[in-house]
Image (cartoon, helix red, strand yellow):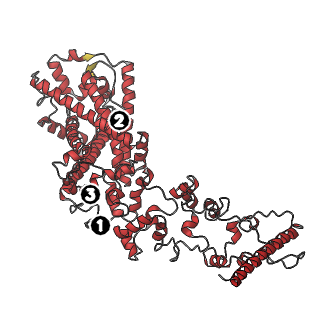
Amino acid sequence: MNTAAARVILAKLVLGFGFLLVTAIAGAQALEDCLACHEDVEYSSTAHPDVACGECHTNITDKRHKRGVEPLTDEDSCGNCHGRDVRTVGRSIHGGQTACIDCHGDPHEIRKVEEANCRVSAVNQIDQCGACHDDPPELVEGYLASVHGRGLLRSGLDAAPSCASCHGSHQILAVDDENSPTSHANSPEMCGSCHGSLLDSWQVESAHGMGWAEGRDDVPVCNDCHSSHAIIDPITAEARLESADTCGDCHAEYLTTFRATFHGQSSHLGLAVAATCSDCHTSHANLPADDPNSSVHVDNVVETCAQCHEGVTASVASFNPHSDPTDPDDNFAVYVVWAFMTSLLIGVFIFFGVHDSLWLQRSIVALLKGELKEERSKQGPYIKRFSAMYISMHVVIITTFLLLALTGLPLKFHYTPWAQTLIGWLGGIEFARVLHRLAAIGTFGYMAFHVGNLFIRWAFLKERGLMWGSSSMVPQWQDVKDFVANIRYFLYLGERPAGDRWTYWEKFDYLAVFWGVMIIGLSGLMLWFPLFFTQFLPGWTLNAAHVIHSDEALLATGFIFVFHFFHTHLRPESFPMDIVVFTGKMPLHKLKAERPREYQRLVDNNELDDLIVEPPTRAEALTAYIWGTIFLTIGVALAIGIIWALLSH
């Protein structure tokens, strides 16, 4: 560099420094001149430390300006230095509605944006923007609770996005404006500015992303799934439990079938570890099932299922996590199972509904005519009807059955408020699962004990009459005749038939337990140990097992809580409760009235006197009524819940 050039540069530096010095002195002098009158003004701006009063107050032309001044506009004050920003705001959604000071605050206190106490700093934007954008409240509240808001405001992560990170600062446009960064066409790139790797893979590995890249506006983008303000960590329990409903906004038909499976039912009740949409379909690489690269393609489904079910076999490929048993084209075998179970359920309910309705009206008439005095009387001698073993067994049956109903029915009716509340009372879905399985073990236990007891009595004690005769629970021709006679009695066409030790409806109740434990038990074991059973059974049998378990449970609970309760406790002859099952003792006159054939046989065989016992003590009766009331109340409440759920769904 030659000497002349160096001198020129030096001269420019001197002149520039001199200009700044003169400006600062002039500004300071101007500030002093203004403060002579405006001593109440405190000027603490760090953004404009050297700006003279007149540079902003361009409407001041008279030093004394006693006659007043014209109000300042953004163009007059801020526009001299920030003209581009003022023009940008004018073209934004805030143009003509919001002034600079509305966001940046008092001009005398404006801070640098990077300062934490600046009104438009990242940590203060939610308060500043929220002062106007507070309707709906979810805008502000959603952000504060979001992973972005917590990251910025609680964890102090400066890189976490604030309002301006997504919406911009001055050139803010309507959310759905085609040029807005938050529009459908632009929002993935906006999110991708932070989540770049997800955007890159989503565009080429996801049906959603590839559709967006093609310019389609009918595919979901980031905020459709993650929301815009109330974004939560996708791996949290809250996010997992909400994800199915989010996907269901577009895929409603699949949400319906998903909610009909164990995965969908249990997640709806709060089981966060249950598989949800993204576990099978992935979140950012979801492809149609017929795409070879799809995680749910037939060639990949075993690997996908193995993420949760280690050791799964290839047979699981025929399991349908979106099974619709009502559609014969979905899986005909499962459809046949559903049709059979539905027919059985409807048939039993219609049969006993008609039977018990006729019985009820006939018993009411008999009660009004005084024909039931003996059945309802608690006076006189008692006869021993059940041994302590059978009393204990019945208590176990009641307890395990109610536990199974309390913990199982909420799964079937997961969509009802009472199911959600009941699961909460039980300590949550995970504890309810433990209770359900313990009750199932108890059920298998009492059934094994009873069958073993029968076998010992038949094989070793040589007891006869277990399979046929008056003491047998096996239906016989006499039961058919009693049924016909009872119908005639209900219709006022004949006398009430003479009952024996076991009536036809009691035999039905008894044998229904065998059927129920076998059907519900086997299907329940398949659902409990799916990996074991799919080693030798196709995966679709799990779909069939779910149908059987669900519908048979509805049949069992509905029958017990409505018809069995009526047969035993709620019919006028026994109302409000027959405590013989808890005490083992029955009034002799009731035996004579309801079961005259058994009474006569005991008399003829000189066995009656051996069975006469003292009436239940006050304590025994009170205990029976207390526990009976608890059991009946739970059952009736569940019956009401079932009916409500069926009618409202």
Q: Residues within 10 Å of mark 3 (few under 14, many from 20)?
A: many
Residue 298 x %, y %: 22, 61
Circle 1 SS class: loop
Q: Quadrant of the C terminus?
A: bottom left
Q: How far from the left and from the top, in percent, is residue 471?
A: 15, 27
Spatial CA distance of label 3 from label 2 is: 53 Å
Q: Which comes before the other along the chain, label 1 or label 2?
A: 1
Q: Is label 3 in contact with label 2 (beta carbons under 8 Å)?
A: no
Q: Position of residue 118 (x, y in %)?
A: 67, 62
> Which sits in the foreground, 8 or 544?
8
Residue at the spot of label 2: 368
Kindly state the secondary structure of the residue where label 2 is placed: helix
Task: Look at the numbered discs 1 and 3 and tell me whether their residues touch, using CB distance below 8 Å.
Answer: no
Q: Give the answer, above or below, for where 226 lies relative to 344.
A: below
Which of the two labelled residues, at mark 3 and mark 2, occupies the earlier sequence position?
A: 3
Identify whether 305 is placed above or below 206.
above
Q: Alpha-carbon neighbours of circle 2 within 10 Å: few (<14), some, or many (≥20)?
A: few
Residue type at tag 1: Pro
Residue at mark 1 to residue at mark 2: CA–CA distance: 68 Å
**Residue denoted by label 3:** 323
457 relative position to 591: left or right: left
Going 31% across and 33% down the picture, which residue do you hit? Answer: 398
Nearer the observer, disc 3 or disc 2?
3
Which numbered tag is attached to residue 288? 1
Q: Disc 1 vs disc 2: Cβ atoms closer than 8 Å?
A: no
